[in-house]
Image (cartoon, grey):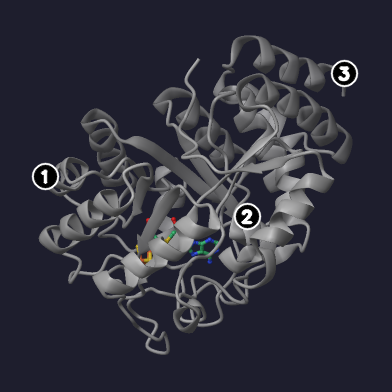
């Protein structure tokens, strides 16, 4: 046990470990080790961000998707999924409401919807930036061409979230149909970084076929890619996917990995995700206590929230909703954190 703790101390000091050392850290998980990692992670976060919690208003702009990721309820083979697409006017109205509530970042997320062409998206992004020049716009719309990413950046988009899902090729192939590859996912991430976005990668915890060895590769990728953000959350099965009967990922392991990510890169923007809040009513607080510093309440119109069903029972009410911001402020306050009105940009060392 003492030796494994020493690996955590080494990570605090050097922000790098070998693949084998990451694998040992992940494989040696115990509640005690996680508690130690969390203590060091919160201290590391405090140096860069204090106890500030950044909030992002999540607007789920389309549930159409041309892809067929095996884990996701929006996959094209799921004929029972309800499909919708928000109009530009509705998206702008969501931002308007969000601004009044105190959001200074809007995240436009959706499936890979062919109808979301560059011209339309650029119009939406520039309209949001014109209405709210003090806000950041984050896009999370999957794999697009480099030219498309460039056009959206030129239109004013500041950040892009594209989880790599797993940094292991064979594992990637188990989670996706053959037309989707880790290689292409990484090309997209590198394009986004080169263009100048604040980029977020990330992965699910407990996805079918995941091991300590694949997780070690995920940690190493974050260390090497140096993204501004990293979104991780437990895998949660969806009833109408091939992974329907699989067990959900572990909240405790997710929190431990949040701590390790914080120690790899103290300036990382790390959300305590909706999936964490879905599996555990105190999941987001637990995430913060492990070193996270971002939450992304749902700002989508009420009538579409149920339809954006990535996984079963996805939380979208209470403090998971933008309307529950007062409750979020209170629950974060109880654990010594403070929800701030701020764009919440990355603070590089
Ligand atoms: N289509 C875009 C964005 C929407 S999906 C994209 O794929 O990048 C956003 C994220 O939801 C995915 O990156 C994936 O990590 C997560 N997700 C999908 N299905 C999930 C599930 N069953 N459990 C947990 N997370 C899931
Ligand atoms: Fe589509 Fe994203 Fe779901 Fe894959 S994870 S099916 S790309 S919405």
Q: Are marks 3 and 1 in contact (CB under 8 Å)?
A: no
Residue picked out by circle 1:
147
Secondary element type, mark 1: helix
**Front-most of residues 274 and 250:** 274
Residue 157: assigned label = none
Residue picked out by circle 3:
2
The quadrant of the picture occupied by the N terminus is top right
Q: Earlier in the sequence, mark 3 or mark 1?
A: 3
**Front-most of residues 229 and 218:** 229
Residue 201 placed where, x, y %?
43, 41
Residue 299 placed where, x, y %?
49, 66
Cβ at disc 1 under 8 Å from ligand 1: no
- Picture residue at 33% right of the left edge, 50% below the top: 132
Q: Is residue 163 left or right of residue 143?
A: right
Cα separation, mark 2 vs mark 1, equals 34 Å
Q: Is residue 338 left or right of residue 140?
A: right
Q: Earlier in the sequence, mark 2 or mark 1?
A: 1
Cα separation, mark 3 vs mark 1, equals 50 Å
- Picture residue at 69% right of the left edge, 35% below the top: 291
Residue 123, picture quadrant: bottom left
**Front-most of residues 93 and 147:** 93
Residue 260 placed where, x, y %?
66, 30
Residue 71 placed where, x, y %?
48, 67
Q: Please tell me whether residue 97 is drawn above or below residue 302 in the rendered image.
A: above
Residue 251 visible, this angle: no
Residue picked out by circle 2:
206
């Amino acid at each position: 046990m003492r030796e494994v703790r020493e690996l955590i101390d080494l990570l605090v000091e050097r922000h790098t470990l070998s693949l084998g050392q990451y694998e040992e850290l992940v494989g040696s998980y115990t509640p005690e080790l996680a508690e130690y990692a969390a203590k060091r992670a919160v201290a590391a976060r405090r140096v860069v961000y204090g106890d500030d919690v950044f909030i992002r208003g999540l607007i789920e702009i389309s549930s159409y998707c041309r892809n067929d990721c095996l884990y996701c309820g929006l996959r094209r083979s799921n004929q029972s999924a309800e499909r919708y697409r928000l109009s530009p006017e509705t998206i702008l109205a969501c931002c308007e409401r969000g601004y009044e509530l105190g959001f200074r970042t809007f995240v436009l997320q959706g499936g890979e919807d062919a109808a979301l062409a560059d011209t339309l998206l650029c119009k939406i992004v520039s309209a949001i930036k014109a209405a709210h020049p003090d806000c950041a716009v984050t896009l999370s719309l999957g794999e697009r061409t480099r030219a498309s990413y460039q056009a959206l950046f030129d239109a004013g988009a500041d950040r892009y979230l594209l989880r790599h899902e797993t940094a292991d090729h064979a594992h990637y192939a188990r989670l996706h149909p053959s037309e989707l590859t880790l290689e292409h996912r990484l090309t997209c991430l590198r394009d986004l970084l080169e263009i100048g976005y604040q980029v977020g990668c990330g992965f699910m915890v407990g996805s079918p076929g995941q091991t300590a060895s694949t997780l070690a590769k995920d940690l190493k990728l974050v260390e090497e890619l140096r993204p501004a953000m990293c979104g991780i959350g437990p895998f949660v099965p969806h009833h109408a996917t091939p992974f329907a009967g699989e067990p959900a990922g572990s909240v405790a392991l997710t929190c431990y990995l949040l701590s390790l990510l914080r120690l790899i890169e103290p300036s990382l923007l790390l959300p305590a995700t909706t999936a964490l809040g879905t599996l555990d009513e105190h999941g987001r607080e637990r995430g913060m206590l492990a070193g996270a510093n971002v939450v992304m309440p749902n700002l989508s119109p009420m009538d579409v929230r149920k339809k954006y069903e990535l996984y079963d029972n996805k939380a979208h009410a209470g403090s998971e909703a933008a309307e529950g911001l007062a409750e979020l402020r209170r629950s974060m306050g109880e654990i010594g954190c403070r929800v701030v009105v701020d764009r919440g940009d990355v603070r590089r060392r």
